[in-house]
Image: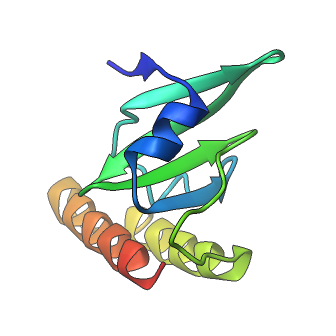
Amino acid sequence: MKYKTSKKNMKESYDKIIKVGYCDAQYLLQYEEPTAYSTRSEGWACDYYDIDGVLISTGYAPIESKNAKVDYETVKNYEDKARDIICSYDNFEDKRIKVKNLLKEFIREA
């Protein structure tokens, strides 16, 4: 179950943060569970995914990247690859493994 936290706390807790826009990595994060979330005056702001000590922040108002360079095209490229895997005829476990490996590759590139 994810817990509520502040953006400030997350910024201070991670050396590497990757910012991803709302729904821009839904296939890439398909097999991951968010560990936390933040809110703003309008409501939900973003979810946080801890992947091997790297924070991925995604949502309407994600926190800025830190020690990572990711542009829209890079995210889209990996998201397209993840979508192709998930929409393939592979079995569930093979899909899960392939997407998790792709996610780790994405993090290394960032």
Residue 69 placement (x, y as % from top left):
59, 78
**Which of the two residues, 26 or 15, is positioned nearer the viewer here?**
15
In the image, taking residue 4 as reference, residue 24 lies left or right, namely right
Residue 86 placement (x, y as % from top left):
40, 62
Residue drawn at (36%, 32%) of the image: 35
Residue drawn at (50%, 66%) of the image: 83
**Which of the two residues, 85 or 76, is positioned nearer the viewer here?**
76
**Which of the two residues, 5 or 94, is positioned nearer the viewer here?**
5
Classify 26 as above or below 45.
below
In the image, taking residue 76 as reference, residue 48 lies left or right, namely left
- Furthest toward the front, the residue is 12
The colour scheme used here is: rainbow
Residue drawn at (66%, 55%) of the image: 64
Classify 109 as above or below 106.
below
Q: Is residue 31 visible?
A: no
Residue 66 placement (x, y as % from top left):
55, 63
Residue drawn at (44%, 84%) of the image: 109
Residue 70 placement (x, y as % from top left):
61, 75
Q: Is residue 20 visible?
A: yes
**Which of the two residues, 39 or 86, is positioned nearer the viewer here?**
39
**Would you identify the image quadrant in which residue 8 lies?**
top right
> Which part of the image, by quadrant, shows the N terminus?
top left
